[in-house]
Image (cartoon, helix red, strand yellow):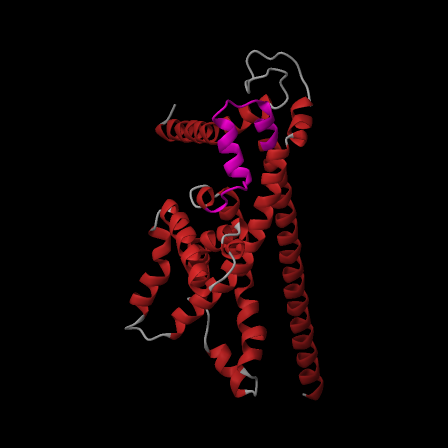
Amino acid sequence: MSSNQIRAWVVRGYIVLFFLYLFGPLIIMSASAFNTSSYPTITPWEGTTLNWFVELGENDRLVNGFINSLWIGAGVVALSVPTALAGAIMLMQVSERVRPIYYTIVVSPVLVPGVIIGISTVIFWERFGSIVGLDYETTNNPFFLTIVGQSTFISAYCMLVFIARLQRFDKTQEEAALDLGATHTQVFWKVLIPFLRPAILSSVVLAFLTSFENYNTTVFTMVARGTLTTELAGLARFGVNPSISALAVVIMGFTLIGAVIYEIKKRREEAIVEASKKRAAMKRMKDTEAAAQQAAAAA
């Protein structure tokens, strides 16, 4: 066996071990959701059942936590993405001398521990409400505090996505649109937003998923309520059963379905673009042939 063959087998073995390490726990957890054992395990296999999915649906704490996580995720997306977009655009507009200072300030929440953000959010809005005379229930609403607290650092993540996209933006497009009579509002909606559409979609997904799995900040701001993550952490203290594995199967199923739908949509869009390019190329060829025939006839 040659050295190249040995190297190839080593690489293949490494890839197999890597994917086993990465997906092995997920496979074991998913399989345990269908085992009749009262503990999430696949050995010994006592029988196949779907009762753990039924028990999952009957667990009011997890169901309510899941619904709360969806509402909070939607609120975080609605607040974080526009804030991040505004911050990224502002970063591109300030002078080169001020830009490093501005960047450090707006990205600094990423470096702050989630525990500190959660505690400071609760204290700030409680003091703010008492100063301006707002009702306690208004400024200490768990959903409001959680959305604001999570958006503090999630918007910084989203802003990094927008900055990376804006660095490739050709400002001459804006200047050309303004020279042709477009207003700044029209330039924003007709030129900049279409260019930023991939970054916007990425930021929406990033903000929602980061909010959905957040624990450190949420555990201080939700107080009497709970999200899916905090409820799972509470149940884990008293021991877990395969209904947790069933929940993992459901989440992975939705994730895979979403990924497949996105990939299908992306490939269709690429096929449409490729087809339009082919049609444009064929049209140019026909126009060139027609021009050549006219020139030959004239000669």
User: Does 248 sit above or below residue 148?
Assistant: above
Residue 256 to residue 154: above or below: above
Point out the stretch of residues depicted in magenta.
221-247
Residue 84 lies in the magenta-colored region = no
Residue 178, horizontal then vertical, whole percent: 52, 84
Tell me the quadrant of the picture where the C terminus can be found. Answer: bottom right
Residue 52 visible in rendering: yes
Position of 263 with respect to 179 (left or right) is right
Which one is in front, 6 or 124?
124
Residue 125 in the image: x percent, y percent? 44, 57
Residue 224 in magenta stretch: yes
Query: Which residue occupies 70% across, 78% down?
Result: 290
Q: What is the tally of numbered marks visible in this picture?
A: 0
Residue 2, image quadrant: top left
In this view, the residue in front, 195 or 211, is: 211
Q: Is residue 134 above or below residue 227?
A: below
Q: Position of residue 293 (x, y in %)?
A: 70, 80
- x, y (%) of residue 160? 42, 58
Residue at image x 63%, y 40%?
A: 254
